[in-house]
Image (cartoon, grey):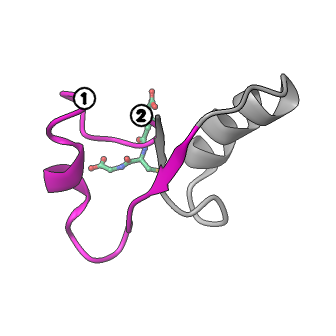
Amino acid sequence: MLILGDRAFSSWSLRGWLLFHAFGLDVPVRFVSLADGSMARTLANHAPARTVPT
Ligand SMILES: N[C@@H](CCC(=O)N[C@@H](CS)C(=O)NCC(=O)O)C(=O)O
């Protein structure tokens, strides 16, 4: 599972997605909001840094 923010506003998210896309790797993608303040809570169960891409 790849967790991303909006690829238009987060170049980190774009880069994470691009790696999988460029190598043709099929991965489920979940998008989280960068704007509504819920991202850290959503990512808490996945990665200590609580940043995207995860
Ligand atoms: N160096 C980080 C960069 C990731 C990053 O800073 N992502 C931003 C989105 S553009 C983020 O999640 N910011 C939320 C925060 O810092 O709380 C990485 O290894 O992935």
- Closest to the observer: 30 or 40? 30
Q: Position of residue 5 (x, y in %)?
A: 48, 57
The one of 23 and 14 positioned closer to us in this rendering? 23
Whether 45 is among the magenta residues is yes
How packed mark 2 is, by other alpha carbons closer than 10 Å (few <14, some 14-19, many 20 or more), is some
The stretch in magenta equals 28-54
- Residue on which disc 2 sits: 54
Instruction: Using the numbered discs, state the Cα–Cα distance from disc 1 to disc 2 in whole angstroms.
Output: 7 Å
Q: Amino acid at mark 2?
A: Thr
Residue 31 - label: none
Q: Position of residue 33 (x, y in %)?
A: 38, 68
Q: Predominant secondary structure in magenta?
A: loop
What amino acid is found at the position of numbered circle 1 in the picture?
Ala
Left or right position of 16 against 37? right
Image quadrant where residue 26 sits: top right
- Residue at the spot x=61%, y=34% of the render? 27
Residue linked to disc 1: 47
Residue at 46%, 52% in the rendered image: 30
The image quadrant that residue 46 belongs to is top left
**In this orientation, which residue lies closer to the viewer: 21 or 53?**
21
Q: Secondary structure at mark 2?
A: loop
Q: How many marks?
A: 2
Instruction: Determine whether the residue tagged by mark 1 lies in a helix, strand or loop.
Output: loop
In the rendered image of this protein, does residue 17 appear above or below residue 24?
A: below
Circle nearer the N terminus (1, 2): 1
Residue at 55 percent across and 63 percent down: it is 6
Pointer 2 residue Cβ closer than 8 Å to ligand 1: yes
| Residue 7 in the figure: left or right of residue 44 | right
Considering only vertical position in the picture, is 49 above or below 32? above
